[in-house]
Image: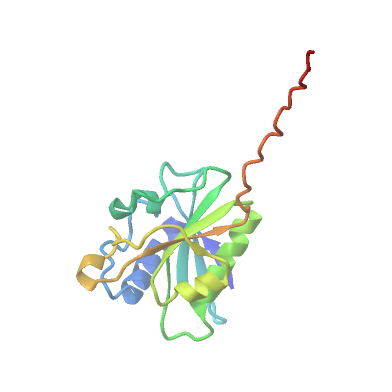
């Protein structure tokens, strides 16, 4: 079961799970976006928190995390509707049942209920096919994240987007045909 949790009451468990899971170089367990984000936890049948994830709303933050990445400044974000960014999803490895997919699916449901037009996140090569099977598409070139030690590990982040509202092509105005008057 995935439920929203208050950040301040769960700050230490969020930091602990991130520390356990992000073994390839998370530079900060807690960052400047945590105070502004909506946090969610995946609970085991016994009631233990086994995974955490957060979501940022474009109508509540000055900038999304992806918009703050120094190597991703060329990303073009949609201008229509609410954008939600999912990040810092992680689950303890000792639990089965595809916890990351449960968290990702719960975030898609949450974004849909919040009437988001788009969901953005970043992925690595390993999980990209799963996200694409969920309907995400790549919307920029891979980059080294400022929040992970990517330059040292060589792992690139791939920006991906899911469109609840499909971009509509601009409707072309009907050409105005002026009547010709033939004069003899």
Task: Give the image location of residue 98, x and y in percent.
Answer: 52, 81
Q: Residue at x 45, y 58 (%)?
A: 139
Q: Note whether 75 is above or below 29 in the view shown.
A: above
Left-right relation of 106 to 124: right
Task: Give the image location of residue 152, x and y in percent.
Answer: 20, 69
Q: Residue at x 39, y 68 (%)?
A: 13
| Quadrant (top left, top right, bottom left, bottom right) of the C terminus | top right
Q: Between 155 and 141, which is closer to the camera in this rendering?
A: 141
The answer to whether any part of residue 177 appears in the image is yes
Task: Give the image location of residue 95, x and y in percent.
Answer: 47, 85
Left-right relation of 73 to 172: left
Left-right relation of 181 to 149: right
The answer to whether any part of residue 49 appears in the image is no
Left-right relation of 63 to 137: left
Q: Residue at x 63, y 57 (%)?
A: 112
Total numbered labels placed on residues in the image? 0
Q: Note whether 11 is above or below 61 in the view shown.
A: below
Q: Quadrant of residue 102?
A: bottom right
């Amino acid at each position: 079961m995935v439920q929203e949790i208050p950040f301040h009451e769960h700050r230490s468990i969020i930091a602990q799970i991130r520390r356990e899971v992000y073994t390839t170089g998370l530079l900060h367990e807690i960052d400047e976006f945590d105070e502004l984000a909506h946090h969610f936890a995946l609970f085991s049948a016994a009631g233990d928190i086994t995974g955490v994830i957060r979501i940022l709303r474009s109508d509540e933050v000055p900038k999304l995390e992806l918009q703050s990445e120094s190597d991703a400044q060329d990303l073009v974000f949609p201008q229509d509707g609410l954008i939600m960014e999912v990040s810092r999803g992680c689950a303890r490895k000792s639990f089965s049942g595809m916890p990351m997919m449960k968290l990702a699916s719960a975030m898609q449901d949450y974004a849909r209920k919040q009437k988001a037009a788009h969901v953005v996140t970043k992925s690595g090569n390993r999980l990209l096919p799963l996200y694409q099977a969920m309907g995400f598409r790549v919307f920029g070139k891979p980059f080294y994240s400022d929040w992970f030690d990517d330059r040292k590990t060589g792992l690139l982040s791939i920006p991906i987007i899911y469109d609840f509202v499909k971009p509509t092509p601009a409707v072309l105005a009907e050409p105005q045909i002026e009547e010709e008057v033939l004069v003899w």
